[in-house]
Structure formats: C-alpha cells, structure tokens
Amino acid sequence: MAENDKKIVFSGVQPSGNLTIGNYLGAIKNFSRFSEEYKTFYCVVDLHAITVRQVPAELRKRTYETLALYMACGLDPQKNTLFVQSHVPQHAELGWILDCYTMFGELSRMTQFKDKSAKNAQNINAGLFTYPALMAADILLYQTDIVPVGIDQKQHLELARDVASRFNLLYSDTFKIPEGYIPQDTMKIMSLQEPTAKMSKSDPNENAIVYILDSKDDIMRKFKRAVTDSDTCVRYSEDKPGVSNLMTIYRAFSGKSFDEIEREFDGKGYGDFKMAVGEACADGLKDVREEFARLIADKSHLEAVMKAGAEEAYGYARRTMSKVRRKIGFVN
Ligand code: ATP
Ligand code: LTN
C-alpha cells in the first residue's frame, strides 16, 4: 500500500519508571502488529512524565531506556516512527489549544487524576489535571485512526474523541476521530501482591511488579511470592483474582488456553503452577532483555533514531497545526 494511504497508529508510554509486564502485555507487545500495514508513531511521552516529580538525570536515562525497549520489543525504526514527545513542539502547542476546548467538569471525572492526586497530595499540579488534553493532542496531531492501549486509558481516549468531535463541530472537520485498540486478554494485568489493583510501575512495593528487564531469579522469586488464595485449585474465576491474574500472564507467555492450563495443573498445587508461570515469563522476555542490553550500550544510535523519528513526526504534526491555527483564527 502507498505510504499515504496507510491508516495511522499512535501510542505512547511515559518514561516515569521501569516498565512492567503490564506495560508489555497491555501495550508495547501489541505495537509491532501494526508496523507493516499501518503508518505507526510510537512516542516516549516525557511531557506527561513531569506531571509527577522526576529526578532530571533519571528522566533522561529512562527516556533512552524506553526508546531502547520499544526497539527491543520488536519495533524496527525503519518501519515505525519512534520519537520523544518534547522533541516535537506541536504536542505542547496543540495541548494548550485543546485545554481551551476541554471542560473542567470532564477533567474532574477522570479516574487517573483522582488516583494520582490521592497518591501525590503534595503536588496536585495543573498539568496532572490537564494531562488528558495533552494526550488528546498527541493522538489528534497525527490524524490517528487507532490507539493501542491498556484498559486504564479508555476513559482518556473517550475524552480525546469528545474533544475532537467538539472541535470539528465548531470549525468543520479538522481531526480524525480515533478508535482504541484494547487487547481483550491482557488489557489489565494486576498487582502480584494486591490482585484487585492494576500492576503499576509507580507502585512502591517491588514484589507486586515484574519488570520487563528483571533477571530470571527476580522473576521466579516474585511469582513464588505472588498472592493466591487458601484454595489449591488452578481455575479461572472472578472470586480467585490472584490465580486468575497468574493464569492470564501464563496464557499470554505460553500461548496455552485457560482450559489447557486448568488441565495441566489439575491435582497439582499452586507451587508448581507459580514456577511454570515464572519460567514462561522469564523465557518470553529473554530475547527482549538481551536485545535491550545491546541497544542501550549504543547511545549514539538511539540518538540517531530519536532524531530521525522527531523529524518525521514533525512533518505530520506541522500539517495538522497549520489547519488548526487557520480554523481558530490565528494570524498566519
Ligand atoms: P504509572 O504507574 O506511572 O501510572 P503505568 O504503569 O500505568 O504508569 P503508562 O506509561 O502510564 O504506565 O502506560 C503505558 C501503557 O501501558 C498504556 O497503554 C497503559 O494502558 C498500559 N498499561 C499500564 N499498566 C498496565 C497493566 N497493568 N495492564 C495492562 N496494560 C497496562
Ligand atoms: N496516558 C498514557 C500515555 C500516553 C498515551 C498518549 C497513550 C500519553 N499520550 C497517546 C496513547 C496515546 C498512559 O498514561 N498510559
């Protein structure tokens, strides 16, 4: 298909911590399935990351790492536009403009804002509140068709669609209305210690999280300690959130169905099951870990990738911005 006829995919990950298997299974692992038939933009969203205080040196390091992880997870920079959000100034520019078309009431209903302001009570800044308008800008700048994300981002995506429709209604068609792509089987990986809560890279309890780059020993130890229940039966059920979460992770890494997993561990205890989940996860991530180690050692290559990505993204973003500026009534 000609490059210009391809549908557009956009997604982003914050360089706000070490990435987890939730980020991997819910988002990044799915990114590469679009590389061939779509025009894909995958962004490291550093402007979003500063809505929570970051140590500058750490933020810089994690920005390189997130880019390297994109590549280690199979995103070839020749086939995907990989870039850093702050390198393309139109994100901040459109973010401000969309702030003026996003309502206080809408932003007040966002559950991520409520959660994050409860966790960062000493720093409930305006950026944390308007975060979804910047995310809408990321998506709408590229006339995006599809946005692959975990289920926790569904509410933000719906807001982006509402803001785009509102703008289009006021000024005639300007933005494409994007659709989400939420993977049904891995849309929400839960904490290993508190399986009713999302596995989140900012959780202070390290035993609750498996990082993509954890060593096999760490992975095995964390699964061994994972919370299950007082039963001994490996069965998928709403009233067994710990076991069900481990089954979801096992299914994703092994390709086995829930039925097959239940049969495999019929009559065996949780000990064997947890070992198998750990093994499958460590094996599934081995290549990513090795590829990451190779990529992160070559900073100048990463810099070349982010530079080329930003130049490519800039061209697309500029086209949308000139349309937006004209429609709003800014003097050219
Ligand atoms: P934080 O803990 O800092 O809020 P996060 O772990 O939620 O971060 P993000 O950078 O906000 O990570 O998310 C990147 C992508 O990973 C998003 O598409 C998000 O939906 C997805 N994602 C994050 N956590 C999970 C999870 N536990 N299960 C499935 N998908 C997830
Ligand atoms: N809000 C997302 C990260 C993000 C994003 C985006 C995802 C920022 N901009 C655009 C998809 C499309 C998060 O917190 N996971």
Image (spheres, rainbow, N blue to C red):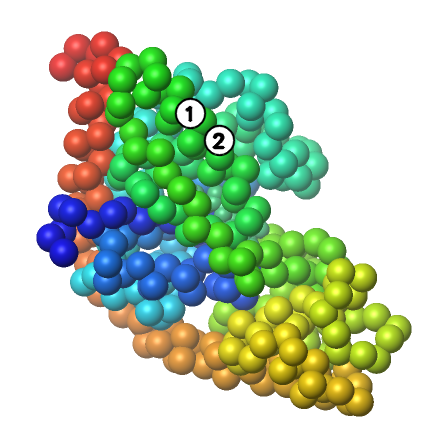
Depth check, front residue: 201 or 53: 201
Give the residue at x 25% y 54%. 38
Pointers 2 and 1 in contact (CB under 8 A)? yes
- Outermost residue on the left side: it is 2
The residue that label 1 is drawn on is 163
Counting from the top left corner in percent of width and height, residue 215 is at 54, 79
The image quadrant that residue 315 belongs to is top left
Residue 286 coordinates in the image, percent (x, y): 45, 81
Quadrant where the C terminus sits is top left
Q: Is residue 211 visible?
A: yes
What's the residue type where badge 2 is placed? Answer: Leu
Which percent across, then down, holds residue 178?
37, 39
Horizontal placement of 292 versus 315: left or right?
right
Q: Nearer the viewer, residue 331 or 164?
A: 164
Which quarter of the figure has residue 265? bottom right
Instruction: Tell me if residue 292 comes above or below residue 108 in the rendering.
Output: below
Residue at image position (23%, 15%) is 327
- Residue at 57% of width from left, 46% of height from top? 152
Residue at the limit of the structure toward the right, as seen here: 230
Q: Which numbered marker is on residue 200?
A: none
Q: Is residue 134 above or below residue 187?
A: above
